[in-house]
């Protein structure tokens, strides 16, 4: 296999590889029969890339750089297990593939830099979140965004239930509990004195395991906000012992067994939209303050020069706006040109890459959330 499926962004290759660099994006489908069309769309996008490469390279290096794409096109296992979108970035030395949890606009471009704006939006915490469905017996994880959410597939060998996690450590008091909820419902416990204390100790051990597992395997990797979904009486108990800095104060007070998926999504959307509204408002306010103090700008040429000099602390970029051209890697000056030509890309995208390379932060916002009409709003370090 000449390509690597990765789960973190950005990758080092974003900043290390020389051109020509290929960026391909397309929406995909999770299930049959809709996913049957996905390889066909991919094949059509490959024709666009081949045409662009032929304007710049001879046939032999084209065959080499395209080989991972041809292999991916024939990978039936891959196409049967996609989510809502894919991104493929390739150089002459490396090819990486992202499975995305949100649809993306079709794009196939060859340039001297990667097109990363859709990836930034796909991975930024302002768009995405995770849900932890927790009971005393089991837990589930979901990932979502403004378009929907899906259950995260956890390795089947991973201990999930309290019985699997605690094993021989499970107290006799817990094993002899009574259930009043009926099949499929949340279990209710009774007990007095020592028996109840033992059950509470078991619950604490299990919650600590769940917290550690989610933090190490998912939260630290994704850095996404985490919403707890559980019966109300577990919220304070779990959050008191949790070491996960990504868990939100806002929770959903329902058991996973009792809540409909549509209701769960609606509840999560309300929480995330309010957090995003506050975060976006704060970013806009910080830009306005920086601009008033001559420490910010929405002028394309000025921001490009500042990014070239690694002076940009934060930049806001409009999600669907494209400014065709490139930034001179030796001077920081802007040169406009046709994005369909191999030498040009999206200047806003190049700015995002420069800001990341300089240690800054990039946020991609919808047009109606942007504080300016130029497509960029940058705050400087000095």
Image (cartoon, helix red, strand yellow):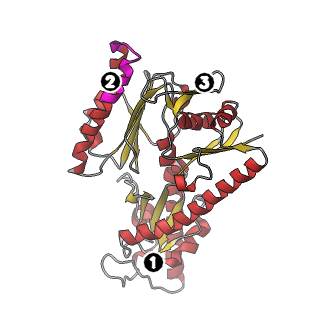
Prevailing secondary structure of the magenta residues: helix
Q: Is residue 271 magenta?
A: no
- Mark 2 sits on what residue? 67
Tell me if label 3 and label 2 are in contact, CB under 8 Å. Answer: no
Q: Secondary structure at mark 2?
A: helix
Assess disc 2: are there few (<14), some (14-19) or many (≥20) residues with their C-alpha within 10 Å of its C-alpha.
Answer: some
Whichever of callouts 1 and 3 sits on the residue coming sooner in the sequence is: 1
Kindly report which numbered mark, 3 or 2, lies closer to the viewer in this rendering: 3
Residue 284 percent across, percent down from the top left: 65, 55
- Residue 98: give its label: none
Assess disc 1: are there few (<14), some (14-19) or many (≥20) residues with their C-alpha within 10 Å of its C-alpha.
Answer: some
Q: Secondary structure at mark 3?
A: loop
Q: Is residue 52 magenta?
A: yes
Front position in the image: 121 or 51: 51
Q: Secondary structure at mark 1?
A: helix
Front position in the image: 220 or 317: 317
- C-alpha distance separating marks 1 and 3: 71 Å
Residue 305 percent across, percent down from the top left: 68, 31
- Mark 1 sits on what residue? 173
Q: Quadrant of the N terminus?
A: top left
Asked which quadrant contains residue 189, the reply is bottom left
**Is 329 positioned to the left or the right of 141 in the image?**
right
Kindly report which numbered mark, 1 or 2, lies closer to the viewer in this rendering: 2
Q: Which residues are magenta?
A: 47-60
- C-alpha distance separating marks 1 and 2: 61 Å
Q: Say above or below: 372 vs 309.
A: below
- Residue 328: give its label: 3
- C-alpha distance separating marks 3 and 2: 30 Å
């Amino acid at each position: 296999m000449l390509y690597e499926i990765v789960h973190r962004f950005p990758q080092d290759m974003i900043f290390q590889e020389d051109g020509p660099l290929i960026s391909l994006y397309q929406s995909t489908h999770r299930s049959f029969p809709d996913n049957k069309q996905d390889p066909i769309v991919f094949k059509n996008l490959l024709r666009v890339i081949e045409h662009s490469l032929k304007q710049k390279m001879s046939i032999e290096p084209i065959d080499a750089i395209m080989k991972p794409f041809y292999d991916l096109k024939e990978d039936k296992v891959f196409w049967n297990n996609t989510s809502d979108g894919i991104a493929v970035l390739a150089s002459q030395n490396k090819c990486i593939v992202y499975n995305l949890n949100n649809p993306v606009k079709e794009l196939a471009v060859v340039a001297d830099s990667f097109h990363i704006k859709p990836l930034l939006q796909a991975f930024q915490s302002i768009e995405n979140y995770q849900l932890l469905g927790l009971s005393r017996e089991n837990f589930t994880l979901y990932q979502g965004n403004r378009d929907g959410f899906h259950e995260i597939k956890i390795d089947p060998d991973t201990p999930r239930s309290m019985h699997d996690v605690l094993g021989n450590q499970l107290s006799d008091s817990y094993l002899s509990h009574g259930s009043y909820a009926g099949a499929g419902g949340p279990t209710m416990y009774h007990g007095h004195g020592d028996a109840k204390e033992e059950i509470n100790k078991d619950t604490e051990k299990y919650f600590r395991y769940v917290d550690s597992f989610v933090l190490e395997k998912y939260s630290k990797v994704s850095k996404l906000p985490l919403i707890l979904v559980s019966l109300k009486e577990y919220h304070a108990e779990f959050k008191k012992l949790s070491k996960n800095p990504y868990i939100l104060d806002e929770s959903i007070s329902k058991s996973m067994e009792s809540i409909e998926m549509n209701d769960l999504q609606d509840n999560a959307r309300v929480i995330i939209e309010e957090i995003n509204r506050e975060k976006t408002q704060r970013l806009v306010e910080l830009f306005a303050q920086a601009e008033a103090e001559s420490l910010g700008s929405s002028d394309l040429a000025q921001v490009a020069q500042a990014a070239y000099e690694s002076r940009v602390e934060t930049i806001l970029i409009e999600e669907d706006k494209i400014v065709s051209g490139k930034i001179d890697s030796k001077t920081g000056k802007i040169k406009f040109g046709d994005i369909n030509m191999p030498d040009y890309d999206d200047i806003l995208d190049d700015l995002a890459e420069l800001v990341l390379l300089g240690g800054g932060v990039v946020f991609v916002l919808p047009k109606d959330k942007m504080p300016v009409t130029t497509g960029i709003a940058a705050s400087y370090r000095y």
